[in-house]
């Protein structure tokens, strides 16, 4: 009986821990659709779960990093939500595709037209962004989540060390740059030319070897033919002599 009671108490305690720790994982986050490579463009999704049982999420504000500004930000329409893109002047202009950019997106705001994100649900908010910076491994976005009861949760804390803060800011991890984003075409062209040269050289050597083989075969056949012909003549002469003798 004592053992069964202890197991029941342990199970209840474990369930309580799970219930208490679950909200820590339900925070606003950002993930790329595929990869977010340095120097390129990507589609990223802000995932917003509803953490309340008695209110809906009706607004999301995402502030963009000022130390690595993004000149191009295009939202994808989301049913039941209005979106507003706010731009700000840059202290230092950016150069994008040979043009100077004097302003960049500083904030994107989604506001619900209807019920918003109801309890027990989550919503994704996609953005096409670029050009991603090359001198950092991550981008930190700060987000404000507003509920229908006017409560505002500030997801703005930057993680330092291994322990995650209570309200962590969404962080986008950047992957290594690829050839699609950086023109290393000269190297590829050189490699291609080398490959073509090697292929051409190989074909020439193969053709030469084939020609040499054919020539050798012809010579051998010619010698064999001469030998056979000589043998035939000799046989004819001997046969004639035998007939004459007989």
Image (cartoon, rainbow, N blue to C red):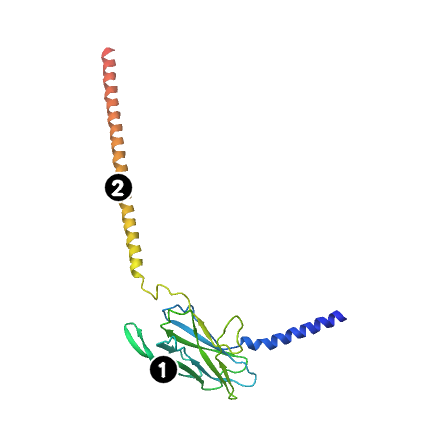
SS category of the residue bearing label 1: strand
189 up-or-down from 71: above or below: above
Helix, strand or loop status at disc 2: helix
Query: Which numbered disc, 2 or 1, marks the residue closer to the eye?
Result: 1
How crowded pointer 1 is (Cα within 10 Å; few <14, some 14-19, many 20+) is rated as some
Q: Using a 10 Å C-alpha cutoff, classify the residue at mark 2 as few (fewer than 14 neighbours), some (14 to 19) or many (20 or more).
A: few
Determine which of the numbered discs, if any, sits on residue 151 in the image. Answer: none
Say whether residue 10 is visible. yes
Q: Residue at x 26, y 41 (%)?
A: 208
Work out how far the residue at label 2 is from the one at label 1, CA to CA, in angstroms. 68 Å
Q: Residue 29 location in percent, x, y? A: 48, 75
Question: For this rendering, which residue is in front, 160 or 75?
Answer: 160
Which mark is first along the chain, 1 or 2? 1
- Would you identify the image quadrant in which residue 179 lies? bottom left
Q: Nearer the viewer, residue 32 or 184?
A: 184
Residue drawn at x 74%, y 69% as measured from the top left: 3
Location of the C terminus (image quadrant): top left
Residue 78 seen from this side: no
User: What residue sits 26% from the left and 37% below the top?
Assistant: 212
For label 1, the residue is 87
Q: Decide: marks 2, 1 in contact (CB < 8 A)?
A: no
Residue nearer the viewer, 127 or 28? 28
């Amino acid at each position: 009986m004592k053992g069964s009671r202890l197991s029941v108490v342990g199970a209840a305690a474990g369930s309580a821990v799970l219930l208490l720790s679950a909200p820590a994982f339900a925070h606003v986050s950002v993930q790329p659709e595929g990869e977010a490579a340095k120097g390129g463009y990507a589609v990223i999704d802000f995932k917003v779960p509803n953490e309340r049982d008695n209110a809906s999420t009706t607004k999301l504000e995402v502030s963009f990093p000022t130390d690595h500004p993004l000149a191009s930000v295009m939202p994808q329409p989301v049913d039941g939500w209005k979106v507003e893109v706010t731009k700000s002047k840059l202290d230092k202009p950016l150069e994008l595709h040979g043009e100077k950019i004097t302003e960049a997106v500083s904030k994107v705001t989604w506001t619900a037209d209807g019920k918003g994100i109801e309890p027990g649900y989550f919503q994704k908010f996609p953005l096409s962004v670029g050009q991603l910076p090359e001198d950092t491994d991550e981008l930190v976005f700060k987000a404000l989540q507003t509920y229908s009861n006017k409560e505002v949760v500030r997801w703005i804390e930057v993680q330092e060390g291994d322990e995650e803060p209570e309200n962590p800011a969404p962080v986008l991890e950047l992957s290594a740059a690829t050839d699609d984003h950086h023109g290393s075409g000269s190297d590829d062209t050189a490699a291609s030319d080398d490959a073509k040269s090697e292929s051409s050289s190989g074909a020439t050597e193969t053709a030469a070897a084939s020609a040499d083989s054919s020539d050798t075969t012809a010579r051998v056949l010619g010698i064999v033919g001469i030998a056979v012909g000589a043998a035939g003549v000799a046989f004819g002469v001997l046969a004639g002599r035998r007939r004459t003798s007989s």
